[in-house]
Image (spheres, rainbow, N blue to C red):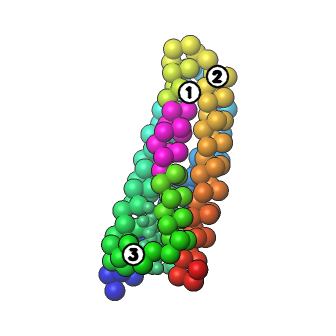
């Protein structure tokens, strides 16, 4: 019973993780022509994206680990292990390159008023998010099939 509840929670967290990736992919790369407005926009976007991405990522990993402790690590299938590796790579991408791109974009506007430079960093961040989407799809498929393969 508690296993099913945690599994449900786990799947809900993965859905929020997907939502945060899609939100990031659909966000516009263009900034306004006003420096202060762009800075404000970018800072609030970085904050929201960090909150949703980190919250859902940590929730997925913690709930997944709880499931793993119930079924026992020795009962892992290779698909489960591959899905877990995908999740850890996604978490790394969100925490390191994506947040670095945001920091660089904020610095570009803040210190050099370089709006086009900031847009380039935002577009790089979006490429990383696209890679995260592919990893998410792979992890989801492998986890879903892990009972059968
Ligand atoms: C470190 C991260 C993760 C760990 C430790 C983990 C662990 C687990 C475990 C132990 C199960 C139960 C398998 C079973 O009942 O046989 C499970 C199920 C599942 N996981 Fe994960 N998981 C992680 C990340 C993810 C991610 C990133 C996704 C999706 C993108 C995902 C999607 C799923 C799905 C859909 C199921 C349900 C499978 C089913 O009911 O047949 N998991 N996970």
Q: Nearer the viewer, residue 112 or 86?
A: 86
Q: Which label is found at residue 117? A: 2
SS majority, magenta:
helix
Q: Classify residue 33 as left or right of residue 4.
A: right
Position of residue 124 measured from the top left corner of the image (x, y, whole percent)? 64, 35
Q: Classify residue 144 as left or right of residue 10.
A: right
Q: Nearer the viewer, residue 90 or 11?
A: 90
Between the C-alphas of marks 1 and 2, the distance is 7 Å
Q: In which quarter of the image is the N terminus?
A: bottom left
**Residue at the image position 53 percent from the left and 45 percent from the top:** 93
Is residue 31 part of the magenta span, yes or no? no
The residues colored magenta run 91-101
Against 82, is 129 above or below?
above
Q: State the SS at label 3.
A: helix
> Are the two marked residues, 1 and 2, in contact with CB atoms closer than 8 angstroms?
yes
Which mark sits nearer the N-terminus, 1 or 2? 1
Q: State the SS at label 1.
A: helix
Residue corresponding to mark 1: 105
Dot 3 surroundings within 10 Å: few (below 14), some, or many (20 or more)?
few
Q: Which label is found at residue 74? A: 3
**Residue at the image position 37 percent from the left and 66 percent from the top:** 65
Q: Which corner quadrant of the image does residue 37 belong to? A: top right
Which mark sits nearer the N-terminus, 3 or 2? 3
Does any portion of residue 65 appear in the rendered image? yes
**Residue at the image position 54 percent from the left and 64 percent from the top:** 82
Position of residue 3 measured from the top left corner of the image (x, y, whole percent)? 36, 80
Q: State the SS at label 2.
A: helix
């Amino acid at each position: 019973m508690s296993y099913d509840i945690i599994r449900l929670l786990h799947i809900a967290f993965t859905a929020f993780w997907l939502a945060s990736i899609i939100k990031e992919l659909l966000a516009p790369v263009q900034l306004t022509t006003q420096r202060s407005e762009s800075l404000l926009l970018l800072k609030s976007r970085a904050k929201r994206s960090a909150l949703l991405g980190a919250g859902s990522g940590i929730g997925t990993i913690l709930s997944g680990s709880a499931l793993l402790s119930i079924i026992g690590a020795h009962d892992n299938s290779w698909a489960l292990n591959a899905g877990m590796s995908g999740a850890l790579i996604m978490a790394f991408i969100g925490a390191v390159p994506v947040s670095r791109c945001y920091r660089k974009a904020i610095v570009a506007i803040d210190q050099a008023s370089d709006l086009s430079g900031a847009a380039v960093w935002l577009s790089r961040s979006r490429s990383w998010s696209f890679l995260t989407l592919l990893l998410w799809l792979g992890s989801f498929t492998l986890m879903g099939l892990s009972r059968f393969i």
